Image (cartoon, rainbow, N blue to C red):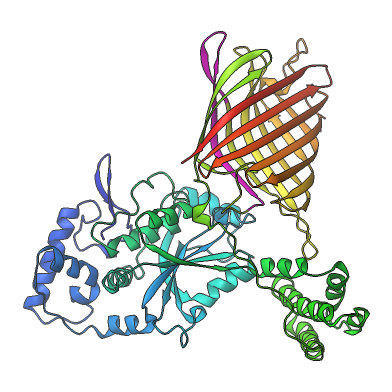
Amino acid sequence: MGHYHQTLSGWESQVDDPDFFLAPDGQHNPEAELRATWDSLQGALRTSLDEAEDIRCHWPARVHWLERRLSLDIPERACPEMDRWLSAVAAYNMTLVFPGGYMNSPSSMFGHTLLRLDAQDRSRNPDLTAYAVNFAANVAADQQDALYAIKGIFGAYGGFFSLMPYYKKVNEYNDLESRDLWEYRLNLSPEMLQRVLWHLWELNDIRFDYWFFDENCSYQLLALLSVARDDLNLTQGFDLYAIPVDTIRRLREEGLLGQVHYRPSFATRLNAMSEQMPAEAVSVANQLAQPQAPTAPVDRLTRDRQKAEALELAYEWMNFRFQHQPLPREEAAPQLRRLLLARARVPGGSPFESVQTPEVTPDEGHASSRWTVGAGHYEGNSYLDLRLRPSYHDMLDDPAGYLPTAELNFLELDMRYWAEDARLEPWRLTVMELANYAPRTPIFKPLAWRLKIDGTQVGEPGEGYWRGRFAVDAGQVVGQMNGLYGFAFAGIEAQAGHASGGLDQPGHDQAWGLAPSVSLGSGWQPLDRLRLRLEARWLPFVSGNQGDVFQGQVGANWRLSREQAIRLEWQAEHQAQGETRDDIRVSWLHYF
């Protein structure tokens, strides 16, 4: 309740607002804060105080905690302001909402969590009109995403809890950012819910330092929900980082998750509609979803079902364009009316089936961290391989429960033990690997992209040199991410380190290289447990001394269980100078 945790120097509260504490040193001295709370309660019981000064109205969760722990019978008093607030939120239960990852925003790649306060009579008070509880950094509206992420890493923002209508968050995440929402009903008794609401009242306008990796939105929601039961310590184990989906798993471990509801995004719904239609009907819908477009093209379709499909898709497509493109209302509204009138003239109900709920929820996917044990052969040398990836997911991992187009890999360390000379050494460090393999569909033609920053040893074991790399690509992806897909990228790669200048040229000491790049590849999931991937890459270096470099890689991943897999990988690099290096390894993967 005081958000205390133990550090090397003692106790410290993660609340960074002096208004939260009653004792002058309350942030670092929980005993002093407890005594100040007790003294304030005794003063309130001895003296008639205004609501704003009475601890029973200002700190109700603390007072009821004292009452429980000390078996007290504290007289109640009227708190009109707090009662009005509790009546306004009208919470009968809570739902945890998880918007999936949004790869086009650095701060949202791992997803987000918020709470929804559900009314008892949901027929009269639908979910969309309920209040949402959100914890977020206080950021200027025009703040750039990249700067926001950088400042968030160093705790440069203040974070606050806030209440807002849930429909606003649905519009933001579900419609504007095209993120699927997962809504987890929480198993809270009336007493547990009351404690959380009291503490939420206490946190009104209270500032926390917002830290992108650990004390973030999901972490603070766990801290809030921890007051529901005295034995809960939901934030334990999240000292270094708190990935949103991992916090959901923690709630499931504690038995706090109930029924799950899937709310597909606007983009997901549009793609699902187009997949149920013939190509000709989709083409007609595209023509109709334009300002001032006549509805005559629909007459080219001979069947009423196809006409209904084209008109309904055109209406939703037009709405999407109105929300996402600078399309004035005076241009969109007349066309939307024309589409509705044309649809009314076609008999029959909606021809579309609802979007199917994915079989695996986000919390049921593989765990976020992974370690790998393997054996391989490189340049005629055998080795044992040990890798640790703190987070999160790559394109060979089982995609169930994850965004199938996304790859996020941070701080993966690869250690190798060389058998011939019994030497253990670091071989590769992947600082960051991000990718969005968003495929082209009949509705959307997104730009796929990827970025990688890493350092790798190159050359003979024990005699190699480190090569740092920064690579960024953009391109197109076609196909089904859970089936067969292909991709083509063009980009640029910068290298640094002695290995970047070309190792075989006497007297050449340039320690950097620069090259455009072209990549072609494919992925395939022929079986539920099996994922395959291959890629070829050409790097015609314009600086450095490597000349043309050709790279190839093939990977196969067989899922043994949700948390275990076997992986086979082959990588090769050929330089125009004639040098070729290849690396093959087989690994056992464990997710945790």
Q: Please provide percent x and percent y for residue 514.
A: 76, 31
Residue at x-position 71% and y-position 67%: 272
* Displayed quadrant of residue 451: top right
Q: Residue at x 78, y 90 (%)?
A: 344
Residue 411 located within the stretch drawn in magenta: yes
328 vs 517: above or below? below
Which image quarter: residue 197?
Answer: bottom left
Q: Image height check: is 386 above or below 62?
A: above
Residue 146 in the image, given as x and y percentages of width and height: 60, 52
Report the label total.
0
The residue that appears at 83% across and 77% down in the rendered structure is: 306
Asked whether 441 falls inside the magenta stretch, the response is no
Q: Nearer the viewer, residue 591 or 319?
A: 591
Q: Foreground: 366 or 405?
A: 366
Q: Nearer the viewer, residue 75 or 35?
A: 75
**Quadrant placement of the N terminus:** bottom left
Q: Is residue 291 above or below residue 143?
A: below
Residue 68 seen in render: yes
Q: Image point 61% across, 27% down: which residue? A: 586
Please tell me in which quadrant of the rendered image residue 456 appears. Answer: top right
Up/down of 22 relative to 308, above or below: above
42 on left or right of 484: left
Q: Position of residue 371 (x, y in %)?
A: 50, 34
Left or right: 98, with 105 as reference point: left
The percent coordinates of residue 509 (x first, y second) are 72, 16
Q: Residue furthest left?
A: 46
| Secondary structure character of the magenta stretch overall | strand
Q: Which residues are magenta?
A: 404-427
Query: Which residue of the protein is positioned furthest toward the right in this rendering?
Result: 300
Decide if residue 53 is in sight here: no
